[in-house]
Image (cartoon, rainbow, N blue to C red):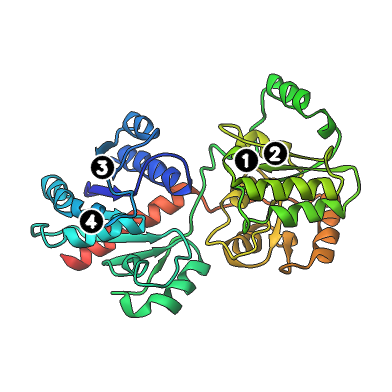
Amino acid sequence: MRKLKIVQILPSLNTGGVERGVLDFNKYLVNKGHTSYVISNGGRQVKNLAEDGGEHIHLQVSKKSFLTLMQAKKLANIINQISPDIVHIRSRIPAWVLQLSKFFIKNPRPIIFSTFHGLYSTPFYSRIMASFDNVIAISKTVEKYINENYERHLKSPPKLIYRGSDKEYFTSKFRPKDSYLENFFSKFPSLKNKKILSFPGRLSSWKGQESFLKLLSELSSDYAGIIVGPYKDAKPKFKRKLDLLISNYNLQKRVYFYNAVDDIREIYFLSDVVFNLSSKPEPFGRTLLEAAMMNKKICGWNRGGAGEVLDLFYPKGKVEFNNFKMLTTQVKEIILSKDAPNNVYLTSDLMHEKTISFYFDALDKRD
């Protein structure tokens, strides 16, 4: 198989789903003998990228500023020097820089791919993601959204390539160390011998933490909850609102905030059910997929990308949006059920294989 030179571009390399995906793909490319470059404004994951065999090139493409557009000539110079087969753009700000850099990129130009990682708003600023040679949608929800809102900007129909997760990392065989479990329950003794419901995701007014608290308030005291995410970074006003709800629902000894740094697998392991209750449709249900890979029961509103994950791997967990009576009933049934997700095939390897195949198809058509 022909070996490719591939450039991925994103704002920065800190934490987040897009960043994790870029790192995983970098590792996959290197292992398959391809040459992998990542252009970003840097971040704490640069070290990991380099350790996996990729090359990072620092360029300020992260700030929402017209000054960032002035990096176009520098970006073109980098691309001309590398002479890659593929450039893969993953965010709107660097996408505009790349668009301007086309004036300076020498022939033969690389084929440019973009991935819609979100349900971007439809104004002028966002349409850039639909304007490149090939577009990838990470779910049917995103594919439909692109076609409905950006069809006139597309050069070809978007390609559906589901997002995947690492089956070796999120495995049902995983078990935390005894010392971890002892330490965890020493911090949260009232979670012992409870049915633990977990809600991973950053604290935001649309993510659904309020719905999660409402659910817990309608369940008996043998149910407890963990709201998993960097709660200290949340907007103070929203955090105070959640604290007030916890107090009003009398949940002080039944629900806890927890910032999983490198122990999200441990939290999934401890969970009886993992939830996604976003008030807006999400492009994909990554946390539900990760939990399902570990054979954990999952539950959420039946819409958007989270609904797709539920439909594929645990239909029992689907609930009509905002139907709290149904949600409460469903949770009780799920807890009692012996059924759990299995054969969760949306792996990161499958996603990477389909992406590489898409690259080769595009290169073959050009040749």
Could you tell me which secondary element the residue under label 2 belongs to?
strand
Between disc 3 and disc 1, whose residue precedes? Answer: 3
**Residue wearing tag 2:** 257
Residue drawn where x is 34% and y is 65% of the image: 129
Q: Can you identify the residue that label 1 sits on? A: 231
Q: In this orientation, which residue lies closer to the viewer: 362 or 239?
A: 239
| Farthest residue, direction top | 179
Q: Position of residue 358 (x, y in %)?
A: 33, 60
Q: What residue type is disc 2 on? A: Phe
Rendered location of residue 278, percent (x, y): 64, 59
Q: Residue furthest front?
A: 237
Q: Say whether marks 2 and 3 touch (CB < 8 Å).
A: no
Amino acid carrying mark 1 in the image: Tyr
- Name the residue tied to disc 3: 37
Residue 157 x/y as whole percent: 36, 74
Q: Secondary structure at mark 1?
A: helix
